[in-house]
Amino acid sequence: MKRAALLARLRQIAKAKGVEMTMQEGGRHTKVLFDGQWVTTVARHSELPKMTANGAIRAAERWKKA
């Protein structure tokens, strides 16, 4: 899966949950946060393995506001 497509999907999930998605750039990964709470990290590669992308999507779908 393309990195841009994964980030777009994570934005859709955040919008459906009614929360703000922000990103923090780390050394080699991008941290994805919903309302300031860490959800997952996304590697800075143009193409990501399908299992990795699915794991990030699953983490975002399961995320609940604390």
Image (cartoon, helix red, strand yellow):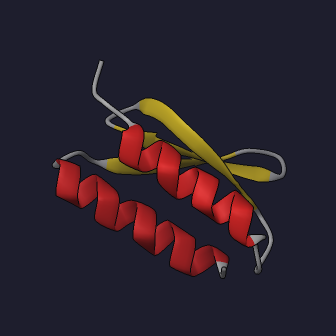
Is 49 or 46 nearer to us in this picture? 49
For the N terminus, the image quarter is: bottom right
Q: Position of residue 26 (x, y in %)?
A: 74, 44
Q: In the visual, does 29 lie left or right of 33?
A: right
Residue at 28% across / 48% down in the picture? 20
Q: Residue at x 43, y 29 (%)?
A: 37
Return the residue nearer the eye: 7 or 36: 7
Q: For the point 65% across and 74% down, which residue is it? A: 3
Percent from the top left, x then y, of residue 51?
71, 62
Apparent side of residue 56 relative to residue 16 in the rendered image (left or right): right
Above or below for 55 versus 50: above
For the image, the number of numbered tags is 0
Q: Position of residue 40 (x, y in %)?
A: 58, 42
Which residue is at 66% across, 82% downward?
2
Work out which quarter of the rendered image holds the C terminus and state it: top left
- Vertical placement of residue 44 versus 8, above or below: above
